[in-house]
Amino acid sequence: MTDPAIDPAVWRERIAALESDAVTAAVIVQCDLAWLRPGLLGVRNDVDQAVMRAQLCRGDRLTVNRVVLHSLPVESAAAAGAFEEWQLRMSAAALLLCADGRPAPRIHRLILGGDQSSAPIPDMVEVLDNGDWTDRQRAGLALDIIHTIGATTPLTGYDMDLDGPFGDADPSIYM
């Protein structure tokens, strides 16, 4: 079962727009905790794959900014596991794109204040199509947060343990 606040059909339609040559930028916000529920795993995977495919095919002509949570405001074992796996996958995908010399999506982790239990912006996919945002106000909200110093921190390969269980056991693997 999916979350009623996140309409999979709308997300899939909007994310499909990344393939259009008329689209030069996208802002994707996925901060709702519903993204970590099993019912939305398929949609979350579809979004991740569409972003990766768009960056592979049109990376030099497309700028993608993604906003996800930096850390979970509430802890449950299932949500924490899904959160870790998702961040690891986004980080690994970005590293793979960079290793191939392609631009990767910019992943901004939103830092919630101590008293915040949810993001101050709605989840969205907004695209810049022929110079016009699909929803200028919503895209502006996300871009304002991205450009506010201290509101986000980037997700990079340095943040994730991509070495595996034996990476630091034998330092010669780095030579």
Image (cartoon, helix red, strand yellow):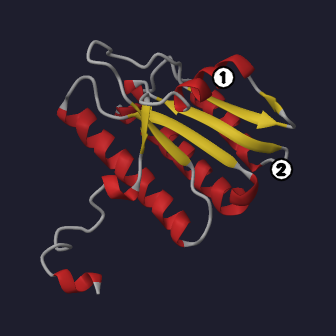
Residue at 47%, 39% in the rendered image = 108
Dot placed on the residue nearer the N-terminal end, 2 or 1:
2
Give the residue type at disc 2: Asp
Where disc 1 sits, the SS reads helix
Q: Nearer the viewer, residue 42 or 15?
A: 15
Between disc 2 and disc 1, the foreground one is 1
Residue at 38%, 17% in the rendered image = 118
Q: Quadrant of the C terminus?
A: bottom left
- Is residue 47 shown above or below 110? below
Q: Neighbour class for label 2 at 10 Å: few (<14), some, many (≥20)?
A: few
Q: Neighbour class for label 1 at 10 Å: few (<14), some, many (≥20)?
A: some
Q: Nearer the viewer, residue 92 or 110?
A: 110
Q: Report which residue position mark 2 lands on.
A: 21
Task: Tell me where residue 125 appears, x and y as whole percent.
Answer: 63, 31
Q: Report which residue position mark 1 lands on.
A: 140
- Left of 70 or right of it: where is 165? left
- Is residue 54 shown above or below 66? below
- Is residue 99 shown above or below 108? below
